[in-house]
Image (cartoon, rainbow, N blue to C red):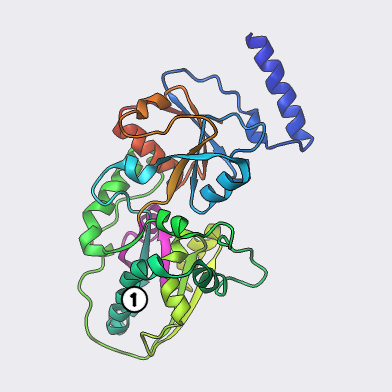
Amino acid sequence: MKGLKRTVIAAACMAAAMGAFSLAACTDFSAGADSVQLFSVAAADVGAAGIEADYFVAAEPAATTRANATGLKFAGDLQELYGAQGGYPQAVIVAKNELIESNPAFLSAFLSEVEANSEWLATASPDVVIEAVSSHLPPDTTPTFNAKNLTAQVIANCGINFVDAQTDKSRVTAFLEEMIAVDSASTVIPADGFFCGALGTASASSDVEIYMPDGAPALALAKLMAEENDFSQASVTYNVVPSESIASYVNGANPAADICVLPVNAAAKLLGNGEKYKMLGTVTNGNLYLLTADGEEITAENLSSLKGKRIGVINLANVPGLTLKIILNKFDIPFETLQ
């Protein structure tokens, strides 16, 4: 039987090499039945023919896109499985110290609009949201959101809710500690000075460049982009960029972003000393879901049923994979990362 399995895998890999399907199918899933077996997949691999997986983990809107394309069904919400009050903080918003010091009045008005964004999203037309985000993408960029994958339910699934830095300090710190427990290189614990305190009242003329990754983080500022800065006299430019490039806008001697939305672990690792930027607050609180073709729905009560199962994870090395590993750790469920 083992020889037959090797033959099947070899044939699959040969087909993959010829372009028949993803190389993700070539993983030799021989891990023990007592552990969850995790492997990395691209978004296009989720539910694709030839990918040997019992479940997939994907973020919205990719989760809905792949479910619609392949017939997969939603089988679990990682926000609910995480279980803590408020869930897990996924993306945070930071601002340059110079802006915090020179124009805190602008930031106070800005954050009031960010806080109001959740209520606005609950009633806004998906077409309005799509236009707000896509109109701020670089030219010739394919937007993450479109008329087929952005619905009111998908918006609700993205976990958009602003929590200010001081209120959320302990939750963010606890989540980062859990990340470090599953991958010591994934992030760091930020200094106290990273968390922005009370804002002053000084006002100044400002040209403000705001950057955010396309996808759920961009929804956190959709109201502001749709209304084109009606709340302030400052000159604000909104930039929605590919998620893989977002860190470049806060790096270097003179980083481009005055305000930036970043994954929580990246914000802590890149900026956690508080010397250039401070965290204003959390803006997204989980948009990760389990998908399956024929598996059972996964809840906290039956999470152990994932033992021996194969789970393909989009961005396994980053927030999606780290969050799943944290949840498995919470329930003392062993896991293996397959190469």
> Could you tell me residue 113's position as x and y percent?
34, 76
> Could you tell me residue 211's position as x and y percent?
47, 70
Q: Which residue is rendered at x = 33% and y = 53% of the image?
A: 89
Looking at the picture, does residue 108 appear above or below residue 64? below
Is residue 163 in the magenta section?
no
Residue 333 quadrant: top left
Mark 1 residue element: helix
Answer left or right for 42 relative to 96: right
> Could you tell me residue 274's position as x and y percent?
31, 65
The residue that label 1 is drawn on is 113
Which quarter shows the C terminus?
Answer: top right
Q: Which residue is rendered at x = 26% and y = 58% of the image?
A: 191
Residue 297 quadrant: top left
From the viewer's side, name the closer residue of 97 and 115: 115
Looking at the picture, does residue 41 appear above or below residue 28? below
Looking at the picture, does residue 271 appear above or below residue 291? below
Q: Is residue 258 visible?
A: no
Is residue 265 in the magenta section?
yes
- Which stretch appears magenta? 259-284
Answer left or right for 186 relative to 330: right
Residue 282 quadrant: bottom left
Answer left or right for 220 relative to 109: right
> Could you tell me residue 176's position as x and y percent?
32, 48
Which quarter shows the N terminus?
Answer: top right
Q: Is residue 177 visible?
A: yes
Q: Residue furthest top?
A: 1
Type of the residue with mark 1: Glu
From the viewer's side, name the closer residue of 174 and 158: 158
**Mark 1 closeness class: few <14, some 14–19, many ≥20 residues within 10 Å:** some
